[in-house]
Amino acid sequence: MTSTETKNHRIMDTANFSIYTPIHSKYVPSPTRLNDILREEIGEGEFEIEMRHNIYNVKSREKLNTLTIAKIRKLSNSGRESTTESPVRRELPFVPPPIST
């Protein structure tokens, strides 16, 4: 159970997170990596991520800069490449076993 004191503390912590940036989950193959990118670029405790209806809502005090957005896009592209490409199957030439005499 959460006390009123705890709720007030949470509200005050996130009160200044007025910027919402939606990122669809299909563009984020790794939520952990998204969190790592935001922590590196924005800073620990300077953002909050929540998932609703397959969309990550990033709440922060400031807009995401172009470098951060580029890193998230790169994450999206790297995830898409690895999941859409099927592994190449190569047939090795048949080599008969040596004949023992």
Image: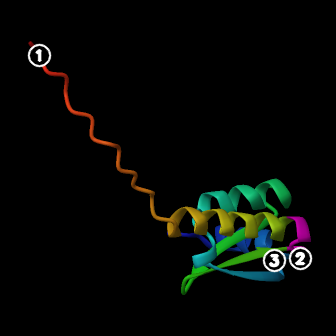
Residue 26: where, in percent of width, then height?
Answer: 58, 77
Mark 3 to mark 2: distance in Å?
Answer: 15 Å
Give the residue type at disc 3.
Answer: Ala
Magenta region includes residue 66: yes
| Residue that badge 1 annotates | 100
Mark 1 closeness class: few <14, some 14–19, many ≥20 residues within 10 Å: few
Give the residue type at disc 2.
Answer: Lys
The total number of labels drawn is 3
Viewer-nearest of discs 2 and 1: 1
The tag earlier along the polypeptide, 3 or 1, is 3
| Residue that badge 3 annotates | 15
Look at the picture and state if 95 lies above or below 26: above
| Residue that badge 2 annotates | 63
Going by the image, does 29 lie left or right of 43?
A: left
Residue 65 picture quarter: bottom right
| Nearer to the camera, 9 or 17 | 17
Mark 3 to mark 1: distance in Å?
Answer: 81 Å
Point 68% across, 60% down: residue: 35
Give the residue type at disc 1.
Answer: Ser
